[in-house]
Image (cartoon, grey):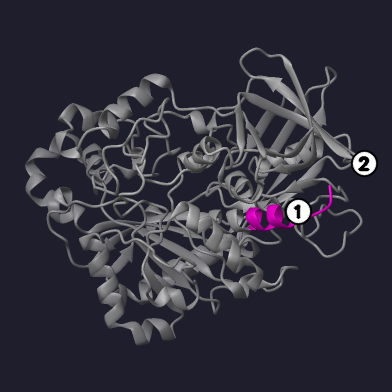
Amino acid sequence: MENNIIIGSGAAGMAASLALRGALVIDAGLRLDSSLAVRAASLGQVAHRDWTDQDIHWLQESMTPSSRGVESKLYFGSDFPYRMNTTGVTWDIHSGYRPSLAFGGLSSVWGASVLPFWHKEVMEWPIPSTSWDAHYRAVLRETGLAGVHDSLSEIFPLYHSEPEVLAESNQAKKIRERMDRSREELTRSGFRWGRSRLMVRAREKSDLVNRLSYQSGNPPSHAQSCVQCGMCMYGCPYDLIYSSRKSILRLAKEGKIRYQSGFAVEGFREWPDRVEVWGKCIETGHNWKNNARRLYLAAGTLSSTALVLGSPSVPTKSAQFLDSQYFSVPLFLIGPTLKVRNESLHTLAQLFLEILPGSISSRLIHLQIYTYNDMIYRLLAQKFGPFLRPIESIMGNIEGRLVFLQGYLHSDDSGAMKMSLDFRTDGSQRVSVDAQANPRSRQVIRSVLMKLFRHIGQTGFIPIWPMLQIGLPGRGFHSGGSFPMSLASEDGKNTSDLLGRPLGLKRVHLVDSSTFPSIPATTITLAAMANAHRIATLAGQLKP
């Protein structure tokens, strides 16, 4: 019998692995298609200046932009992070969120933006806000952090003693410096801003050879730090954007955990002295079973919740999810930035902009600004079509004036999702997930854009309101709260205790965002990792 089994190799599963020496990590472990991995690795093992036009075209064509953005962020053109297993649970999803069976979960395709939760927005949670600090530091020691000490540090500590620094794009620098010149007025109006914080490797490390975790055999990467090739949106050939699969591979190689992929986990049952967990081998379809003294569910909020609802140990078969409403809008810059198409830069978030609680909302609103990437040129080329060549001379001016904003609201201002589980006559499970919109979301987003309009002179940009996109609940993948932590269980409500144990279970711990009592607007992954590390650390100290 195992001491500890962790289900899931995503960000939360990795963080729990750091705290549970010797744990067995199990998941389906879907990986990048072999042919795509080989092609990507061929680029990741040479200098980006040696990439051919054909190589760059292959990367760029892996996603096609439109005026509505991209439907799903792919990884070198593959949708493997979203593929569903054809056996076991049948999913019927009518929301923006999708579960992941990938090795590394959704950390394969995320934007790498990280912020801790603002302490004022977790003060009502049943754990002290200061209890997060050590766990933020523990996970950031593992993942690394690219960021700087600036005014954002006043409300969002870095929690890292030696953060790395990524170069700032020219557009981002102009926006930030303009806002800095109007700091007094913008601060009085409730704005806070600063450089983005990213889990991206930005500094050479002579003591560690970076390896390509998406390719079998994990060959060395040519680059030790970001080369600013501008291809971030498609998947980094040098594997410099953090994915939890990198840590899982390292921990397994060093013998600190064991990792087994290829298993679809279908259920568990808690007994007085153990937890029985079972599923199927994806390749053979054979049944699989194991036992552990403790089970940690880190499969992502949808999958973890479905496992709890499907357990014979749990009577309830439905759950409500909280969400952080996602929206996006292009911004038009008052002043152009020239030659952005030829600039060396990364294309992840460049700036974070916060709107503190006030007249718009009683909760903080989080905005991320993305500057130029080649999709802007490709989208303009689509729009102008045969007229592109005659206006090519002014395209540079248009490109230099366009950036992109993504925004998130607190769950109080957002929609939700509902999950229902049914058992079919053959014993299989059907899980339905339905979005539930909140009319207040649109009102708050409208107020955000109006506030930005009122400060055009201080920010230097204008939201292009007709191109506003508001996602379905779950579209931003900042969701959770299906079993919120509580000091005491409440009849008729799905709750968990402070160690993530849902509905009175003693040996089963939810360690992903399923336990969050609310979903603040700031990025969710770092907090999910810190909470997973906290739960696993404390649960690991309990008697067997």
Left or right of 3? Residue 73 is: left
Is residue 66 among the parts visible in the rendering? no
Magenta stretch containing residue 539, yes or no?
yes
The one of 385 and 373 positioned closer to us in this rendering: 373
For the stretch drawn in magenta, the main secondary structure is: helix
On screen, residue 370 above or below 243? below
Q: CA distance from mark 2 to mark 1?
A: 16 Å
The image shows residue 435 at horizontal and vertical percentages of: 65, 45
Answer whether labels 2 and 1 touch (C-beta < 8 Å).
no
Left or right of 498? Residue 479 is: left
Left or right of 291? Residue 169 is: left
- Neighbor class of circle 2 (other Cα within 10 Å; few <14, some 14-19, many 20+) is few
The image shows residue 154 at horizontal and vertical percentages of: 46, 78
- Residue named by callout 2: 272
Q: Amino acid at mark 1?
A: Ala
Quadrant where the N terminus lies? top right
On screen, residue 358 above or below 327? below
The image shows residue 103 at horizontal and vertical percentages of: 53, 33
The image shows residue 171 at horizontal and vertical percentages of: 23, 62
Q: Which mark is residue 429?
A: none
Disc on the earlier residue, 2 or 1: 2
Left or right of 485? Residue 243 is: left
Q: Amino acid at mark 2?
A: Pro
| Element assignment for label 1 | helix
Magenta stretch containing residue 272, yes or no?
no
Residue at 55% over, 76% down: 357
Residue at 71% over, 20% down: 280
The one of 191 and 268 positioned closer to us in this rendering: 268
- Residue named by callout 1: 539
| Element assignment for label 2 | loop
Q: Total marks drawn?
A: 2
Write down the region rendered in magenta: 531-544
